[in-house]
Structures are given as structure tokens and as C-alpha cells.
Amino acid sequence: MEARAKSSGTPYPIWVYGEYLTEPPKRPNGALRPVGHYIDKGGYPGANVYAVDISTLCKGTAAVDGRGSRIYTQDILLHEAEDEIGYFVVEDEETAVDVVWGEIVALGRLQAGDISIVGNTVDYPDFIEGMRYHVENGLNVPYLPSLDVMATPLPFLKMTCLKCGYVTLGCCYVARHKDCGGFFTMDFATKIYRKGEKEKAFA
């Protein structure tokens, strides 16, 4: 089964992509590995095998987003139409759930050109809570083309605590202000244009 998961037994877990193995694979020298969960990245038999944390396992789907990136379970998708945005979480290989309204849709019904992967619920477990807070309190849902802007051309995220007013810049989405417990609302350090506006660029 094609999957991804975070490496285990290391101080800084990384995402590993490849074939999820249910049987402990042999090492290149023929020795057996201990019972556990593994992903084989391929290449020389037994050499590119990583022990992974099963709680982070995300199964591959047949779908791709507008950039051609493969979609996995637990991915957070930005659905961007001309006059609205929405977020979906990939529930299983066939379905996705609207983050705000809870509507279940077939993954195949989402047009690849209208969706992009912005993050996942493993790295951002409080994303759903943050978005629902905005809707429940009559606030605009933030436009977030990425939950981690460090590796993108997007500017830093500007986070404003709705409880105490604290403002900070960061590269990764955070739902709550750790000092006062309030929710952050999100923006960017500089203006970005959405699809359907003049163009996607910075002002």
C-alpha cells in the first residue's frame, strides 16, 4: 500500500513516502528487523526502509491536486472557487469532509484544478478547531494557500489573537495563542491576491 508516515525512533521525525509494510522487512545483510511498522522508499532491497509512527500513517489516494501532487488521507485541501473558498480534510481513499459544515463529498468530485494541498491534520491537529471558531463567531474564514510558508514564495503569516490582540509573524499556522488561550486569526505580512482577483501576486 502506497503511504506516508513520520519516522520513529529519531529526535526529529521526518515524513517518509513509499510502500507501507505489514511484515518486518529484512535488512540488506539478511537480518530481520524487529516487529513494527515500516515504509520502504524503494531502491536497493531492504536499504531504504524506515521505522514509522503508525499514528501518523496516511494512505495514498488516486487523486491529485491542481499542482499534480498526490493526495493522501489526512491532507487538508483548499477548495478555491471564483467567489468562495472552503477547506476539506481527506477522510479515506474515497471521501473528503468539509471542515466547517461537515459535508461529506466523494474525493473524485473535487476538480483537481480547484483544489490544493495546504497541510495535513498530523502536523496541524488544531486547524479544524481554528476554522470552526471563525465561522461560529461570524468571522471570515482565513485564506491560507499554505499552512507552512517557509518553503513557498508566500510571505510570513500574520497572526492576531482575537482575545488579547497580540500580533506576531510566523511561518506555520497556529490556532491558539499559548499565553492567553485565545484563537488567532490569520493574514499575511503583505497582501496576496486570490484566484479570480487581478492575479496571484504580492502588493
Image (tube, rainbow, N blue to C red):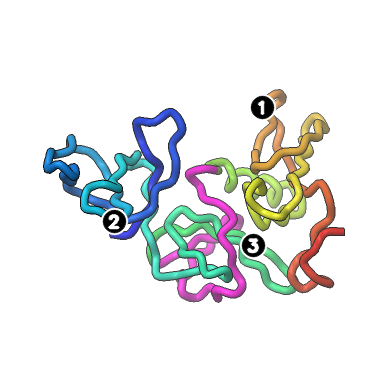
Q: Is residue 139 above or below residue 169?
A: below
Q: Is residue 3 left or right of residue 76?
A: left
**Label 1 element class:** loop
In the picture, the quarter occupied by the C terminus is bottom right
Q: Residue at x 33, y 41 (%)?
A: 52
Q: Residue at x 46, y 74 (%)?
A: 108
Q: Which residue is mark 2?
A: 43
Residue interval drawn in magenta: 94-123
Q: Which residue is mark 3?
A: 86
Q: CA distance from mark 1 to mark 2?
A: 44 Å
Amino acid type assigned to the residue bearing label 3 in the image: Gly
Q: Earlier in the sequence, mark 1 or mark 2?
A: 2
Q: Position of residue 50 (x, y in %)?
A: 31, 43
Q: Is residue 9 left or right of residue 187?
A: left
Q: Which residue is mark 1?
A: 178
Q: Is residue 27 visible?
A: yes
Please rate how many residues cluster around mark 1, counting C-alpha atoms within 10 Å: few if below 14, some from 14 to 19, many from 20: few
Q: Residue furthest top?
A: 179
Amino acid type assigned to the residue bearing label 1 in the image: Lys
Q: Is residue 133 above or below residue 177?
A: below
Q: Position of residue 73 (x, y in %)?
A: 42, 57
Q: CA distance from mark 3 to mark 1?
A: 26 Å
Which numbered mark, 1 or 2, is in the foreground of this view? Answer: 2
In the picture, the quarter occupied by the N terminus is bottom left
Q: Residue at x 65, y 42 (%)?
A: 172
Q: Is residue 199 left or right of residue 146?
A: right
Examine the image and state in which quarter residue 200 appears.
bottom right
**Label 2 element class:** loop
Q: Residue 169 magenta-drawn? A: no
